[in-house]
Image: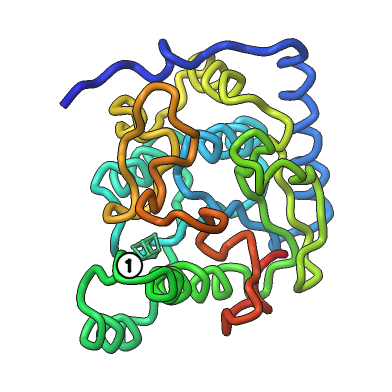
Amino acid sequence: MDTAKATALHARASAGFDGRVESARRLLARAAAAHPDAIVQASSLGAEDQVITDLIARDRLPIAVATLDTGKLHAETLALANAVRERYGIFVERYRPVQEAVVAFVGRHGEDPMRKSVELRKACCALRKVEPLGRMLAGRSAWITGLRREQSVDRAAVELEAIDAEGRTKLSPLADWTWGDVWHYLALHDVPYNALHDRFYPSIGCAPCTRAIALGEDFRAGRWWWEQDGAKECGLHVAPASTPFAAAVAP
Ligand code: SF4
């Protein structure tokens, strides 16, 4: 399989980079102080989230780091969670789907039914991602995401700080960062990142639903690429009315 160091390919700081780093640090520090023992970084272990984890560790902020272990993650993603612990001494909390629900879903629809219909794909995401996210956020008043405006049209209006449908503070400290900024930061601080990024995966989700992209393809072209319609989101950052867990996630 072809590989190329993602840092060499993408690290390009844009004008104002240092200022954006400082703004992100201040935002995280302020949020940690405002939500003692009640703030979590919901990390996908993607490139952006690794920047945020590094910022948290750098300033020793009392912010928990957690991920959704869907049962469908790549081995490289799981390995990165261990690398975070080794590098920073931070234990990445893992929230898994309810086992009985997974057994029932797989028994009824098969192991990987996501390509049969958009509805089944969304049902799988609701089961493996959205419901565990609700548990991750339970008892917490603030959460942090790696969303950036540049990632897709649907994310173009992401705010640095917002209030989600449950009244929680939702922070996206890299909302105004470019992809080049993210990689410049990772390279500058030698931050561990997912090995799949070196294999042309810019956006990494579950193994059956993620592929590498070709030169010139859209940033999220490698996610649910067989679907033609609608936003390529899993329900973590959108709340479709039909989702039973909609109340637990952000708008
Ligand atoms: S991304 Fe794919 S495997 Fe993961 S929860 Fe969604 S449909 Fe299921």
Closer-to-camera residue (209/135): 209
Q: Is residue 63 left or right of residue 191?
A: right
Above or below 10: residue 247: below
Indicate the secondary structure of the residue bearing disc 1: helix
Above or below 37: residue 175: above
Quarter location, residue 12: top right
Q: Tell me where residue 172 appears, x and y as whole percent.
A: 70, 44
Q: Tell me where residue 208 appears, x and y as whole percent.
A: 27, 56
State the residue lying farthest toward the front: 228
Q: Residue at x 71, y 37 (%)?
A: 175
Q: Is residue 37 left or right of residue 105?
A: right
Say what amino acid the circle numbered 1 marks.
Met
- Which quadrant of the rendered structure holds the N terminus? top left
Coloration mode: rainbow
- Tell how many labels: 1
The answer to whether any part of residue 106 appears in the image is yes
Q: Residues within 10 Å of mark 1 (few under 14, many from 20)?
A: many
Q: Is residue 73 left or right of residue 122?
A: left
Closer-to-camera residue (101/1): 1
Quadrant observed for ligand 1 in the rendered image: bottom left
The answer to whether any part of residue 96 appears in the image is no
Q: Residue at x 24, y 68 (%)?
A: 112
Q: Tell me where residue 51 appears, x and y as whole percent.
A: 56, 32
Q: Is ligand 1 within 8 Å of the beta carbon of the residue shown at mark 1? A: yes
- Which quadrant of the rendered structure holds the C terminus? bottom right
Q: Tell me where residue 197 appears, x and y as whole percent.
A: 36, 30
Q: Which residue is mark 1?
A: 114
Q: Residue at x 45, y 71 (%)?
A: 122
Quarter location, residue 150: top right
